[in-house]
Image (cartoon, rainbow, N blue to C red):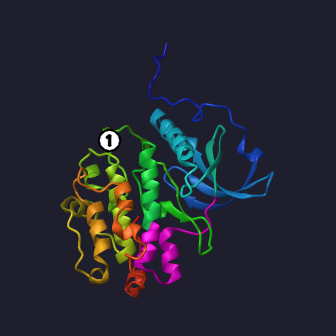
Amino acid sequence: MEKPNPRRPSSSVLPYERPRLRDHYLLGKKLGQGQFGTTYLCTEKSSSSNYACKSIPKRKLVCREDYEDVWREIQIMHHLSEHPNVVRTKGTYEDSVFVHIVMDVCEGGELFDRIVSKGHFSEREAVKLIKTILGVVEACHSLGVMHRDLKPENFLFDSESDDAKLKAMDFGLSVFYKPGQYLYDVVGSPHYVAPEVLKKCYGPEIDVWSAGVILYILLSGVPPFWAETESGIFRQILQGKIDFKSDPWPSISEGAKDLIYKMLDRSPKKRISAHEALCHPWIIDEHAAPDKPLDPAVLSRKWPYG
């Protein structure tokens, strides 16, 4: 008789019975493509309301860990769903071929695309955005969730209006963790990964580092650690030298630079926490950050730093 294989996945991701997606929604145009799944616009039949549907082909889930990863992503999204700056999940569905996650659709575009199309940007506007991002990080950490892949592409505006909310999405690499627990697998996107991830021993402080990289790019248009190759980027990150001499940094406030220094401290133990960052004078004092437009050259630069 064949022995059980502990790595062989069961046939289901969801531990409960769910109705079929097609009984409740109509799938529309493709909105995006990720490593594991494709996101479509979908319409709820009963209300004619539009949502986004992330469809994950089960053929890509080749081992038990893959099934567990998808189930964990679903749990984390439900866990954070009440936060005003996290995309809300509407429901989960599964059939023999796909796992579907239905969530609110964000039609306002990606973070950097919105800034570039707007045509002007100031430190004070950067404060509002990084405050939102840090608020999501603080909420994640307070609920025992490590995001592990913070980057601009994972933040979308919920509408095209001027007062649109910025919302976090894609928790595919996120994990639950316990205080004092360390993780060892290397994950994340090259420009945003913290040095301790590359050293294969890290905790939730990595999310603050990634947010610090986002803030640096918001204010300058380029990442703090850059090279032609991935290995070169990693060497720069491990060296940790931050350039505040090149344009436009001489015209950026000392408060902004101080916060970035503290968020990009190479020592996780010395690095500022998300809560402490939210209490930094540059963020908490609405008049500390200048409202004058940044150098137009910042906006003219490309933002291909995924």
Residue at the location (24% across, 61% down)? Answer: 237
Q: Quadrant of residue 131?
A: bottom left
The stretch of residues the image draws in magenta is: 105-129
Residue 111 highlighted magenta (yes or no)? yes
Quadrant showing the C terminus = bottom left
Residue 255, percent from left and from top: 30, 72
Magenta span main SS: helix
Q: Work out whether residue 5 can be spotted.
A: yes
Q: Work out whether residue 221 can be spotted.
A: no
The three-letter amino acid code for the residue at tag 1 is Leu
Residue positioned most to the top? 1
Residue 49, above or below 60: below
State the count of labels. Answer: 1
Residue 89, percent from left and from top: 61, 49
Q: Secondary structure at mark 1?
A: loop
Residue 226 highlighted magenta (yes or no)? no
Q: Quadrant of residue 236?
A: bottom left
* Disc 1: which residue: 183
Q: Is residue 256 left or right of residue 92?
A: left
Q: Is residue 230 left or right of residue 36?
A: left
Q: Nearer the viewer, residue 3 or 80?
A: 80
Residue 268, above or below 246: above
Residue 122, above or below 11: below
